């Protein structure tokens, strides 16, 4: 079945959307079924669209969203810039921990040598405990180094 279109159909649809009718178009609608149906469908679709838009919540203000996105991008850039510093701090912390872990053994060996030398000079001192002088120094050293490490880690 072939449907023929009226040459006034486009005008009828635009009038149905906007509600602007002239006398010639109104007279044509009384005679033409195709234009009358097209105008009725256009009015119905316009009413439907207006009803949907009236039920939608208002759109959010884009300025806070844009500001939040810019702040997030700036934060990401600063995190990227600070990454080498954080890596260097972690490597320095691991190196410091490795050095500090050897202090008790080094202190023990040094104090043993020192006490052995002193004991050979004074035979009465051989009864002293061998672990006293330098091995006791590693505890405050570890505490100070750990405070420095935590401070520099928090600053980065």
Image (cartoon, helix red, strand yellow):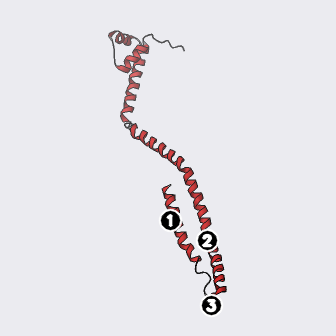
Q: Compared with residue 6, is residue 132 higher up or lower down, i.e. above or below?
A: below
Q: Compared with residue 35, is residue 141 higher up or lower down, i.e. above or below?
A: below
Q: Which residue is mark 2?
A: 103
Dot 1 or dot 2, earlier in sequence: 2
What residue sits 53% from the left and 62% below the top?
A: 149
Residue 107 placement (x, y as % from top left): 62, 75
Residue 126 placement (x, y as % from top left): 64, 88
Alpha carbon separation for disc pair 3 and 2: 28 Å
Residue 68 placement (x, y as % from top left): 43, 43
Disc 1 vs disc 2: Cβ atoms closer than 8 Å?
no
Residue 27 placement (x, y as % from top left): 35, 10
What residue sits 45% from the left and 10% below the top?
A: 7
Answer with left or right where residue 114 lies relative to residue 153.
right
Q: Residues within 10 Å of mark 3 (few under 14, many from 20)?
A: few
Judged by depth in the image, the label closer to the viewer, 1 or 3, is 3
Which disc, if any, is residue 124? 3
Q: Which residue is mark 1?
A: 147
| Residue placed most toward the observer, 116 or 86 | 116
Which disc, if any, is residue 127? none
Q: Quadrant of residue 96?
A: bottom right
Q: Residues within 10 Å of mark 2 (few under 14, many from 20)?
A: some
Task: Label 3, secondary structure: give it.
Answer: helix
Judged by depth in the image, the label closer to the viewer, 3 or 2, is 3
Answer with left or right where residue 106 lies relative to residue 30.
right
Alpha carbon separation for disc pair 1 and 3: 41 Å
Alpha carbon separation for disc pair 1 and 2: 17 Å
Q: Residues within 10 Å of mark 1 (few under 14, many from 20)?
A: few
Task: Label 1, secondary structure: give it.
Answer: helix
What residue sits 56% from the left and 77% below the top?
A: 136
Dot 1 or dot 3, earlier in sequence: 3
């Amino acid at each position: 079945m072939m449907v023929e279109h009226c040459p006034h159909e486009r005008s009828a649809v635009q009038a149905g959307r906007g509600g602007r009718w002239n006398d010639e178009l109104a007279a044509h609608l009384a005679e033409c079924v195709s234009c009358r149906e097209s105008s009725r469908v256009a009015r119905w679709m316009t009413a439907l669209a207006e009803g949907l838009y009236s039920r939608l919540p208002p759109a959010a203000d884009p300025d806070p969203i844009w500001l939040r996105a810019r702040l997030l991008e700036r934060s990401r850039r600063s995190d990227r810039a600070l990454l080498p510093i954080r890596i260097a701090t972690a490597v320095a912390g691991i190196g410091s921990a490795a050095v500090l872990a050897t202090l008790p053994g080094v202190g023990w060996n040094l104090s043993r040598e020192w006490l052995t030398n002193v004991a050979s000079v004074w035979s009465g001192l051989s009864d002293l405990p061998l672990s006293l002088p330098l091995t006791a120094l590693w505890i405050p050293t570890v505490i100070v180094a750990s405070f420095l490490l935590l401070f520099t880690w928090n600053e980065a």
